[in-house]
Each structure stands twice: as structure tokens, then as C-alpha cells.
Image (spheres, helix red, strand yellow):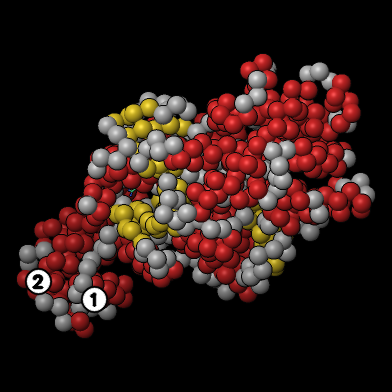
């Protein structure tokens, strides 16, 4: 079970979709789960709206959208075995109660569903398009957090096996996606620390997404820089230098951005020793979300197979 | 519609909205720095999580709620000392909640009980969008104090950018909710309430009775603060609708943030907030695009000239380039800048549409040009703020 997280907008849904498509393509029965109900996953997979009940959207690839109310319904059916439930009026009311008033319950209902699928061996792999960096710990470590607050009750009994599953690094891992910009990298490093220091949840991979190409490479860099200096200082004026000025000014944004990227990536690589960092380049930005997923799936095939 | 300069010169409160990653925080700081340097005003910039470099540039070392004054030397513009003063502070949700509880609690006993409640931290982290509520709270505090003439707030990244504005309303709803009433009804009368009985039976079964008692205790305490919270929420809402409060939408010209911006423009207007400014950030200068286009035409005509190659060799003689390197570098420059020109042109078509959209909503569209440089000093912020101009 892999939880794909990262700062907002960095490409969590895209990467999770690509990873799931890759897994399905090598014959693994795969479940991908959207946790935030934004509908972005359906777009990425080029399919219609997803429901709580998983649907096979392409061979071997099952997709669902998490919904706490449905999850609670299922949970009660499976674990509470209380005949009252059937006569119980609007479920939304209990949901209001459990989900909003009791800390961690909403998370455990969602994560509980995921753990259940894993425990029942319904799939070979479960990929979760999870919460953003700020909330992922509350999500992935919900059973541990809740067991500290609840002393008895059905939930308490259930937290133990879930906790074991989530803390078993051979079963569960977090994948952190970052773009090579200052804030996403910083958040990633903070999350690596938090996961390491306050939880027993393992990190499976760090992905640097939307990495730009170098403007020039290798030995050409020195020539490019020297030319840029000449253009700026205008020490040796000529028509050639004149003609290169505006184009080089235009490229300057890209070269400086790339320089910052390289610095940020170095920090990220230095920090995520185990497993290292996987690079995903910036695809055609005008493409549809699903096309980006397709390109990314291809990169995964090339890299991982 | 008020121009951006008028807003900065006469406004009391500017709320900066937009999707994550568009440069909201930088823009808030830059406009604040510019306003402080240009006008005789005390400007406070309230920000959620500034990038380390930006925090350094502002001298924000302590990650707490404390307000820091930016040194006036840092705000000097073209050798002229600033006309006003600039302050900056970060919003620390945890500390702010504690302060809020302390203020709203009817007595110290309730305050201490709440602050030491095991569920308190967990709850405030989650319910009624606590980050959003706190941002609104801090904004109100600052705006009410007579320490500042202009307050600029950078809104926290939310799933929905409007959540932050709805936070006070949601807080009021929470206090009025049946859920809270149900929870805080005396255990005894619960037994007699037929409607609530199955509810508590199931809840007891799932969560355990002890947990339920803990929660009930907490909310009973919390309810004693209702008056303070509701009064506060009403005041915050009123301030947001005030005449001298101005909203700003920041976006880049990429499709996702742009969508969000369009949504915000409509939504703000529908809700009756006064949106005066839309800022298109990281825009490639039109002038530069045109210059590059002209230059590229010339370049194409002359790359094969021996004199052209000679001039390039001369310009780069310090690094002794080979002929192969020269031709590769020059062709890379022309290919990649041609690509940039094409993208830039598309950007300006998008910009035109955004301009129309903004003026339809009585807002001024302003542009902030893209720069590869990083903001390392507050002076760079002043210059950046000054560079923001009407489209
Ligand atoms: N490597 C890439 N190259 C080009 N475009 C990309 C790349 N990765 C993601 N994108 C695009 O960036 C946008 C945001 O990606 P995505 O929706 O996956 O982010 P997210 O982290 O799930 O966002 P949120 O936090 O809102 O859930 C999408 O339009 C996607 O197509
Ligand atoms: Mg997503």
C-alpha cells in the first residue's frame, strides 16, 4: 500500500495515476483511491466520475473515490453488528458526530477501508492519492493517534491490526512528490523528519516532479555564460552581440530557474538518502492531464522495468 | 474600482487570495514593502508560511506570532529613505488558538481546563477549518489595533480559497448546530430523549463511553465561550465588508491557477466583497518578446556569416570555445528563445482575456513581470512591488 503525498499541486494525483497504470500494466491487480473527492483522479485516468465502489477502469486497474459516509456504513456493517443500525435513521447524523467531533475518526474510517482491502488480499497493490503534506501524518497514522485517545470501544479494537499493517515497512510506504522549488522541497524535508521522528511509517520514495531540462549542457555551459556576460556588459560591441541580447534575456529566466532547481534538488537528494530521489521531467504543459499521466507511465516503464 | 496605488495609499485592509504557488506571499510582502517606502503609512504584512528566503529577506527569524519591524534602511528606494514603516508577522495557528481561548473564556478556570484538555489540540487542528479561522482572527486583531494604517494578509492555502472567508460564518454555525446541542445535553436528559437514544447507543459502541464523555466535557466547556466567539465572528465578517477593505486575486497564466482565479473573481463579487485588483504574476514582458522576435529574424540571417562567428568568438575568447561549441550554443539560444517567444505570445492572449474578465468585474488587472532572480533582500521586494503596473 503506497500513500502518495506532497504539497498542493505538485502532481500527487498525476504520479499516483502513473504508478497505478504502470503496476496494472505489469499484471498487478491494482486499486487506486482518491481521498480528497476533487474529481482530479477521474480526469487523470480519463474516466467518468468515481464512486466508493471500486470500478475496473482499464485492465487490472480499479479505481474508487473515498467517502467517509459509505465507509462508515461498511464499517458498521462489518464490525458493529448492531441490529439497531438497520433501523437507524439518517446516517449523516452519526457521521456528523463521529467525523467532526471525534478527532481522527474520519481518518480512521478512510484508512480502515484501505487496510481492509489489503488485509483481505483483494488487490496486489493499493495506491492512495493521499492528503497533502500538512495532513498526511493524521491520515496515515490515524490508528496510532486514535488509539492514544480512545480507551475502549470497537474502534479501539480495530486500531491495533491497522497500526501493525501501516507500520510494517514491507507492506506500507509513503511516496512524497515535490517540485524542485523552495517550498515544496522544504515541506518534503520537514515531512521526512516528522515521519521519521514521530511515526513508525516508512518512506518508499521521493519523487522530484516537473524538473526542467538544462538550457545548455556540459562544456557548452562555460561558453553560454561567457556569451551572456558579453551581452550584458557590452564590452566588445558587435551586431552579433546585439542580435543575441533579447533572446538571451528571454532565456535568462529559464537558466536562473534551472540554477535554483539544481540547488533545491541537491538538498533534496542529500536528505533522502534511503531510496534516493526519482526524477520526472516537465512534460508538455499544454497537454491534457491524462496525456501527462501517459507520458509519466512510460517513464516509469523505462526506469523500473 | 480603485487603482492598486490608491488601495495601497488609502486602504485599511487588503486580503490577498489565489491558488497555491502563484506567489501570493511574495506579492503581499512586495506590495507592503513598496507601500511603506512610498507612503507615510505603517504597513503590516501578515503571512502564513513564507519561503525561507523571503523570511530571511524580511528578517523574520522567529517562527512565532511576534510582529517584527523591517529596518528602514532595507526599504530605501533609489537612495530615498522610506516614507512609512513596514512590519511583518507570521500566523502561528497553535499559539493563536491558545490566545483566542484565553480571550474568549469566561474565566480562568474554563481557560485552563480547555487548554489542558487532551482533545483540544486535536480538535482545533481539524474542525471548522481552524487555520482559516485563525487567519481571519489575526487580521481582525491587527486591523482593530491602532498600530497600523494598512494591513495586508496573505490567505492560507485552502482546498477552496473561499474557505477562509467563510470561516467566521462556519464558526457561528458550529455554535448553533444541533450536533453541539446534542453533545452538550446533560447525560440524564439524553436518556429521555427518544430521538437521541439510538444515536448514543451506536456512538458508545463505536467509540467507547469514556471517549464520548471526554468529548462531551470538552464541548460543554467550549460552549461557555459561545458568546465571545460569535461576537468575534460577526465583527470579523463586518470588517471584511467594510469600505476600505479591498480584495486582491493573484494568479499566474498557467491553466490551473487561472481557473481558480476566474472562479474567485466571480465568487468574490457574488458575495459582495470589493475586489479591486487582479494581479497576473510571472508574466513575460511583451516588449522583450517583441525584441527577441526581431533579433531572432536577424540572427537567422546572419548565423552563417563568418563575421558573426568571429564576433561571438571574440566575445567569448576568455573560455576559448571550439567552432562546434559556438554553433551549438548559438543554435540552442535561437531554438529555445523561439520557443519562449511562442509561449510568451500565447501568454499575452490569455492575459487579454483576463483583462476583460477583470474589467467586467470592476477590477484593475495589474502585471508583475517574471524574473529569474530571487528575493534576497527587502530592497528587492520594494522594487518588485513598485514594478507591479496596470496591464
Ligand atoms: N511532470 C509534469 N509535467 C507537466 N505537467 C504536469 C506534470 N506533473 C503534473 N502536471 C500537471 O500539473 C497539474 C497538477 O497536477 P496534479 O493534479 O497531479 O497535482 P496534485 O498534487 O494532485 O494537486 P492537488 O494538491 O490539487 O490534489 C495537472 O494539470 C497535471 O497535468
Ligand atoms: Mg490531487
How far from the left and from the top, in percent, is residue B5? 60, 51
Tag 1 and tag 2, C-beta contact below 8 Å: no
Q: Mark 1 — residue? A: A222
Q: Residue at x 72, y 51 (%)?
A: B121
Q: Mark 2 — residue? A: B324
The answer as to whether the residues below labels 1 and 2 share one chain is no
Q: Residue at x 89, y 25 (%)?
A: B189
The image quarter containing residue A223 is bottom left
How far from the left and from the top, in percent, is residue B150? 70, 53
The image quarter containing residue A70 is top right
Picture layout, residue B194 above or below residue B268:
above
Q: Residue at x 53, y 51 (%)?
A: A164
Q: Viewed as shown, does residue B163 lie left or right of B107?
A: left
The image quarter containing residue A221 is bottom left
**Residue B190 is at least partly visible in this image:** yes
Element marked by disc 1: helix
Q: Quadrant of the N terminus of chain B?
A: top right
Amino acid at each position: 500500500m503506497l500513500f502518495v503525498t506532497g504539497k498542493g499541486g505538485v502532481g500527487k494525483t498525476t504520479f499516483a495515476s502513473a504508478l497505478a497504470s504502470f503496476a496494472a500494466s505489469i499484471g498487478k491487480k491494482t486499486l487506486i483511491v482518491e481521498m480528497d473527492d476533487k474529481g482530479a483522479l477521474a480526469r487523470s485516468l480519463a474516466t467518468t466520475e468515481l464512486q466508493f465502489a471500486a470500478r475496473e477502469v482499464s485492465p487490472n486497474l480499479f479505481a474508487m473515490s473515498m467517502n467517509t459516509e459509505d465507509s462508515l456504513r461498511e464499517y458498521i456493517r462489518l464490525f458493529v453488528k448492531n441490529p439497531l443500525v438497520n433501523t437507524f435513521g439518517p446516517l449523516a447524523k452519526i457521521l456528523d458526530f463521529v467525523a467532526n467531533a471525534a478527532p481522527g475518526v474520519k481518518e480512521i474510517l478512510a484508512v480502515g477501508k484501505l487496510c481492509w482491502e489489503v488485509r483481505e488480499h483483494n488487490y496486489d497493490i493499493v495506491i492512495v492519492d493521499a492528503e497533502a503534506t500538512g495532513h498526511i501524518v493524521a491520515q496515515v497514522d490515524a490508528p496510532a493517534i486514535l488509539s492514544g485517545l480512545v480507551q475502549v470501544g470497537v474502534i479501539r479494537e480495530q486500531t491495533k491490526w491497522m497500526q501493525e499493517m501501516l507500520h510494517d515497512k514491507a507492506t506500507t510506504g509513503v511516496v512524497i512528490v515535490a517540485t524542485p522549488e523552495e517550498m515544496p522541497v522544504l515541506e518534503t524535508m520537514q515531512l521526512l523528519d516528522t515521519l521519521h521522528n514521530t511515526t513508525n511509517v516508512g518512506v518508499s520514495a521521493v519523487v522530484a516532479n516537473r524538473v526542467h531540462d538544462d538550457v545548455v549542457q556540459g562544456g557548452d555551459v562555460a561558453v553560454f555564460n561567457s556569451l551572456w556576460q558579453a551581452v550584458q556588459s557590452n564590452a566588445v560591441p558587435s551586431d552579433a552581440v546585439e542580435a543575441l541580447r533579447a533572446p538571451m534575456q528571454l532565456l535568462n529566466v529559464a537558466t536562473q530557474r534551472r540554477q535554483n532547481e539544481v540547488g533545491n534538488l541537491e538538498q533534496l537528494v542529500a536528505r533522502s538518502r534511503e531510496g534516493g530521489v526519482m526524477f520526472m521531467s516537465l512534460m508538455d504543459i499544454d497537454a491534457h492531464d491524462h496525456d501527462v499521466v501517459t507520458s509519466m507511465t512510460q517513464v516509469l516503464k523505462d526506469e523500473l522495468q | 474600482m480603485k487603482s492598486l496605488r490608491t488601495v495601497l495609499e488609502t486602504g485599511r485592509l487588503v486580503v490577498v487570495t489565489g491558488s497555491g504557488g502563484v506567489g501570493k506571499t511574495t506579492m503581499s510582502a512586495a506590495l507592503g514593502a513598496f507601500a511603506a517606502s512610498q507612503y507615510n503609512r505603517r504597513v503590516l504584512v501578515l503571512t502564513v508560511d513564507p519561503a525561507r528566503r523571503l523570511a530571511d529577506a524580511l528578517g523574520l527569524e522567529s517562527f512565532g506570532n511576534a510582529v517584527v519591524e523591517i529596518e528602514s534602511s532595507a526599504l530605501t528606494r533609489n537612495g530615498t529613505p522610506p516614507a512609512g514603516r513596514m512590519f511583518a508577522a507570521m500566523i502561528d495557528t497553535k499559539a493563536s488558538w491558545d490566545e483566542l481561548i484565553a480571550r474568549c473564556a469566561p474565566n480562568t478556570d474554563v481557560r485552563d481546563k480547555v487548554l489542558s484538555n487532551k482533545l483540544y489540540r486535536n480538535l482545533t487542528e481539524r474542525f471548522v477549518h481552524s487555520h482559516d479561522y485563525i487567519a481571519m482572527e489575526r487580521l481582525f486583531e491587527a486591523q482593530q489595533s491602532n498600530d497600523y494604517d494598512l494591513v495586508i494578509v496573505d490567505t492560507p492555502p485552502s482546498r477552496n480559497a473561499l474557505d477562509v472567508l467563510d470561516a467566521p460564518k462556519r464558526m457561528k454555525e458550529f455554535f448553533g448546530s444541533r450536533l453541539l446541542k446534542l453533545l452538550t445535553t446533560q447525560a440524564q436528559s439524553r436518556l429521555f430523549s427518544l430521538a437521541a437514544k439510538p444515536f448514543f447507543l451506536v456512538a458508545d459502541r463505536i467509540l467507547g463511553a469514556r471517549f464520548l464523555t471526554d468529548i462531551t466535557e470538552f464541548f460543554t466547556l467550549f460552549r461557555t465561550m459561545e458568546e465571545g466567539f460569535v461576537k468575534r465572528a460577526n465583527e470579523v465578517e463586518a470588517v471584511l465588508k467594510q469600505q476600505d477593505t479591498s480584495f486582491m486575486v493573484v494568479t499566474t497564466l498557467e491553466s490551473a491557477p487561472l481557473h481558480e482565479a476566474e472562479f474567485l473573481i466571480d465568487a468574490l463579487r457574488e458575495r459582495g466583497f470589493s475586489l479591486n485588483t487582479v494581479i497576473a504574476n510571472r508574466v513575460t514582458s511583451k516588449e522583450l518578446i517583441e525584441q527577441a522576435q526581431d533579433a531572432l529574424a536577424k540572427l537567422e540571417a546572419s548565423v552563417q556569416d563568418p563575421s558573426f562567428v568571429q564576433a561571438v568568438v571574440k566575445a567569448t575568447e576568455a573560455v576559448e570555445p571550439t567552432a562546434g561549441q559556438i554553433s551549438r550554443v548559438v543554435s540552442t539560444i535561437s531554438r529555445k528563445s523561439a520557443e519562449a517567444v511562442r509561449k510568451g505570445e500565447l501568454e499575452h492572449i490569455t492575459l487579454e482575456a483576463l483583462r476583460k474578465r477583470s474589467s467586467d468585474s470592476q477590477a484593475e488587472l495589474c502585471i508583475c513581470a517574471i524574473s529569474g532572480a530571487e528575493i534576497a533582500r527587502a530592497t528587492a521586494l520594494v522594487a518588485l512591488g513598485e514594478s507591479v503596473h496596470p496591464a
